Amino acid sequence: MAKTSPSLSIPATGPDLARAQKLVLELMAIPGKSGEEADVAQFIRQKLLAAGARPADIKTDDANKSTLLKGNTGNLILKLPGTVKRAPRRMFSAHMDTVPICVGCQPVVKGEFVRSANPATGLGGDDRAGAATILTAALEILERGLPHPPLTFCWFIQEEIGLQGALHLKHSMLGNPAFAFNWDGGSPDKMTIGATGGYRMNVEVEGVASHAGVAPERGVSAIAIASIAIAELHRSGWHGLVQKGKCSGTSNVGFIHAGEATNVVTDRATLKVEARSHDPKFRQKLIGEIEKAFKNAAKEVKNVEGKCGSVRIDGRLDYESFRLDPHHECVELAEAAVLATGRKPLRAISNGGLDANWLNAHGIPTVTLGCGQMNVHMTSEMLDLAGYRDACKIALQLATGS
């Protein structure tokens, strides 16, 4: 592996772990679901300024003007010039938003774990632990004057609703990083070097309304059309875990809304469907089978007059798949940093989406590491403090070490 720079060295002492724990507790207590991250961003900004960051080095992009939710802030970016020569820029990222179940979180430490004292909420470690991990590294560098390559820190918005902040990131504000390290859910041992691609569809089924008791034969049931389509996808192996020869993927009908009363043949149904695969060509085949099933079902259901229903399908690519070369410099640097904590690095390929999907699509090879989050998106969520502390050590080494 080609070393980034012989003049970089690991800090003589690690990060202030007591402060790191305080930061993550404070961040998890701030409400900030997708689209409402402004208070989280303001907290991070104030910590950076207090540590000596120049106001001109902290910027917010306008990604929230293009995202699905027109949120109250954009991505928060800190860009630092390097203090060593001939070192490529490194990027560090995490997302600020949490899922709605985490609003109202009351983080409390119980032994070596953090839980929410409010039994009705999750914790928000996904991904306030990641936000605190990279904030800890930035504060250590600013306050201690540690030598480092050029660095970019980015706190993303709206990850939980489809990686929207990373998708609409303003690349020109990043300083052209050579590679990146992203922190999200899981153990710090785990290094995600690849992830699947995902496609989402909104399906609108239109039938013909009629009285279900007086003249059901004159109606065309949108519910029947949707049911036939789903049943066909299931029978033919195109729903759930999809395996066709050497190709594989997943699909799911995750939402259905139709009808208001039992005495009306329902004329409209709305469904939300997704398709995922690491293979873009097979994912497109999966999408085609889903579309075909709904269109065929619409033709099959007819009323006494011979009228049938119709289907309108709108889809979008949520994120494209990627897989890093296991010998890429960022992978080997991450492995070395994990090993330095006494942990055994585990390379992983994810069947879910990450901000790293879009960073890689933007030309920034990115490894994703965990911060000790457990049972994310659940009221039983916990943060393993031992894992979180190691994540902070790993981040600081990657920000300062070769």
Image (tube, helix red, strand yellow):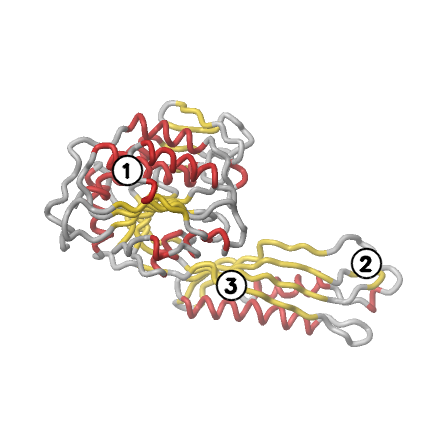
Q: Residue at x 80, y 54 (%)?
A: 262
Image marks 3 and 2: residues in contact by CB distance under 8 Å: no
Residue 39 screen position, x and y as percent: 47, 37
Q: Secondary structure at mark 1?
A: helix
Give the distance between the C-alpha atoms of the residues marked 3 and 2, in whole angstroms. Answer: 33 Å
Residue type at tag 2:
Val
Residue extending furthest left?
6
Q: Residue at x 49, y 61 (%)?
A: 199
Q: Earlier in the sequence, mark 1 or mark 2?
A: 1
Depth check, front residue: 146 or 380: 146
**In the depicted structure, whether residue 234 falls above or below residue 126:** below
Give the distance between the C-alpha atoms of the residues marked 1 and 2, in whole angstroms. Answer: 61 Å
Would you name the residue on which mark 1 appears?
137
Would you name the residue on which mark 2 appears?
264
Nearest to viewer (mark 1 / mark 2): 1
Residue 364 screen position, x and y as percent: 30, 57
Would you name the residue on which mark 3 appears?
316
